[in-house]
Every structure is written in C-alpha cells, then in structure tokens.
C-alpha cells in the first residue's frame, strides 16, 4: 500500500482554495462547480445541482432543518424543480449515510466472508494513486464497464469529453484524489475521493469487468479504509447515501467493510407548480402504469421513490 494513497491534489493549495474552505462543503462544491454543476448558497448552506434540475445540500453529513418559506423561495428563485436534504427534524424517506468512524482497523475488522476476497485482491493488485494520464487512457473504459453492469449511463463518466472535463477539474482541486487498484500497469478499479476537513468522502468507484474475479473493488475499499483509519487527522469516512433505487448488494457490501448506516430522513421539497402536477391522480396513474411495464427501470424506480419522499416530507415531522 502506498503511504500517500489519500494524499490529495497535484498542486499546493492556493488562496482560492482557502477561500472555498471557509464554508462547510466548499471543497466538494468547488470540484462540482468546475465540472459544470450550479452551486447555490441559500438557507445558510451550500447546494449543488444534480441531473433532473434538483438541488442537494452540502456537506453530506450535515442534518438540516430549513425554514419552509426560505426553502421554497430558494427553489423558485433558482428555477429548479426541487431540493433534497438530510434531516432529523423533517419527516421524509427513511435513509442514511454510510460512515466509518476512525478506529483501529485490520483484516479482522472485515466480515469473515470478505476476508478471502480481500486477500485474493492483495495477491493480484497493487493499490496506489492513479495519475491523470492513466485515468485519461484507461479510466473511461472502466466507467463504461461499470455503468453497463449497473444498467445506467452518466454522461460525466460515459462521454469522453465530459470525462476529460472532470479530470481537469480534479487536477486543480487539492482535495481530490484517485486511489486505484492496478494489475501491473493495467487499471482495474479506482475511486474518486474528496478530503473535506476531518472527513474523507468516497464519491465514485469504478472497475473493469474482466478483473472482477480477483476482487479489485474489495482490495481498494479495504486499503482506503485502512489508510484512513491510520490517519490521525481524519475523524470519519463517508461512503455515500442510501440510494433512491435498489442497489442490490451494495448495502451489505459496505457494512461488511466496517461501515455503519447512520440514519436520517431524506426530505424532498418540490417547486409548488410541479408538486401540484405530480400529486394529481393522472400523474400518479401514469407513473404506476409505466412501472408495471418496466419494473426494472432504475430511472422510473427513482422517480417513484422521489414521489413517495415528497408525500412523506414536511417540517417538524409533519408531512406536507
């Protein structure tokens, strides 16, 4: 394992870096903004746009209790379709964040069923930071391979020009790193991580189909978690939210590496006009019909989950 696996960036921090870091979540916000996402400051925090013209809050681990009128004003003023945020004060979807709180960590910390997979991975792969050149030449193929297995397509990772923009954004953000598993010079799996204060966020993870029998993802997750556990300047590692769709064995995978699901409610607020349209009987009937025709469609499942979240969400534990 390289000792500087989680060492971030390729340049010394600049005054621009320092300015962004004054606001919680700014390190990730800057990376997202350079990739073309809109960044909004409202309700006392940072928000960023996701596909579908929704806003999501930063940093991920902060639980919010926004004023409903201020939240609606943000949605109207920025002409987005809605906003989603984690909360313990609002009602909403039962959700959570996968978190590893720093503590002693070794192979014995991993579930017994994953240990032989990690050992096999350690025998076949070397884990070290991937360079921009390696990601330019090989990363796009891993992106396509991963998304094909998952039945989805994200243009940022699937379109070569968008992928190059993402890598260019990472190259000027000192908080971003790309720990990766290599078989010789062949890239087998990589992560994108962001160091935000005393938290490390695992943002994305991609791997090559042909290498999966030797478990590159397992060795990468284990090695990154182990190095984070040994970093006294870190408090926790975040491995993302519970997704809005059925992600197969992803939940069990993360728990078996020592992560815990820290629960919260995922509150979703729509633009008032869209809220009225989507809550109408015809819209609900159309969604049910579409789901019956394509029950495995991930996009339709996400829309259905969002609509359930809208119905459940409200301030002070009271659904709207």
Image (cartoon, rainbow, N blue to C red):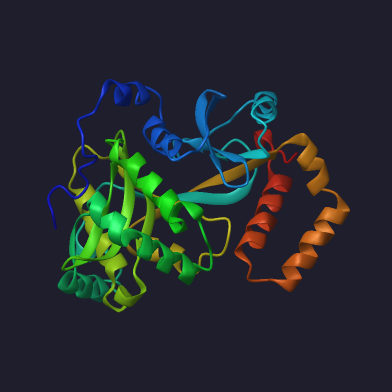
Q: Is residue 225 visible?
A: no
Q: Is residue 36 left or right of residue 167?
A: right
Q: Is residue 34 visible?
A: yes
Q: Residue furthest front?
A: 161
Measured from the top left, where is residue 95 in percent x and y? 55, 51
Q: In this view, does 111 lie above or below 131?
A: below
Q: In this view, does 176 lie to the left or right of 108?
A: right
Q: Which residue lies furthest to the right in this view?
A: 281
Q: Residue at x 18, y 40 (%)?
A: 232
Q: In this view, does 89 lie to the left or right of 207?
A: right
Q: Residue at x 29, y 59 (%)?
A: 137
Q: Is residue 166 above or below residue 28?
A: below
What is the quadrant of residue 211 in the picture?
Answer: bottom left
Q: Which residue is drawn at 63% across and 67% down?
A: 297
Q: Residue at x 37, y 25 (%)?
A: 20
Q: Pick whichever, 109 or 179, lies toward us.
A: 179
Q: In this view, does 167 lie above or below 297?
A: above
Measured from the top left, where is residue 142 in percent x and y? 36, 64
Measured from the top left, where is residue 138 in percent x and y? 30, 62
Measured from the top left, where is residue 149 in percent x and y? 46, 71
Q: Which quadrant would the N terminus be assigned to in this image? A: bottom left
């Amino acid at each position: 394992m390289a000792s500087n696996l989680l060492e971030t960036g390729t340049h010394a921090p600049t005054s621009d870096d320092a300015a962004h870091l004054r606001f919680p979540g700014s390190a990730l916000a800057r990376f997202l903004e350079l990739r073309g996402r809109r960044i909004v400051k409202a309700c006392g925090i940072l928000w960023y746009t996701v596909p579908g013209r929704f806003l999501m809050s930063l940093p991920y681990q902060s639980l919010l209790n926004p004023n409903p009128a201020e939240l609606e004003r943000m949605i109207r003023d920025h002409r987005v379709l809605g906003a989603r945020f984690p909360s313990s004060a609002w009602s909403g979807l039962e959700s959570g964040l996968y978190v590893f709180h720093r503590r002693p960590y070794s192979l014995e910390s991993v579930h017994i069923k994953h240990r032989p997979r990690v050992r096999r991975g350690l025998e076949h792969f070397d884990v070290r930071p991937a360079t921009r050149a390696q990601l330019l030449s090989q990363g796009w193929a891993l992106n396509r391979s991963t998304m094909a297995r998952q039945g989805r397509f994200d243009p940022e990772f699937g379109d070569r020009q968008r992928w190059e923009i993402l890598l260019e954004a990472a190259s000027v953000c000192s908080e971003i790193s790309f720990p990766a598993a290599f078989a010789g010079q062949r890239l087998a799996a990589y992560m994108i991580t962001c160091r935000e204060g005393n938290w490390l966020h695992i943002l994305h993870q991609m791997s090559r189909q042909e290498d999966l029998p030797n478990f590159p993802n397992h060795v990468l997750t284990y090695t990154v978690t182990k190095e984070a556990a040994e970093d006294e300047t870190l408090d926790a590692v975040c491995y993302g939210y519970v997704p809005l769709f059925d992600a197969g064995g992803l939940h069990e995978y993360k728990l078996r590496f020592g992560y815990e699901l820290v629960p919260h409610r995922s509150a979703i607020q729509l633009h008032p006009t869209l809220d009225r349209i989507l809550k109408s009987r015809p819209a609900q009937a159309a969604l049910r019909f579409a789901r019956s025709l394509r029950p495995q469609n991930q996009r339709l499942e996400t829309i259905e989950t969002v609509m359930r979240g809208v119905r459940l969400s409200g301030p002070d534990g009271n659904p709207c």
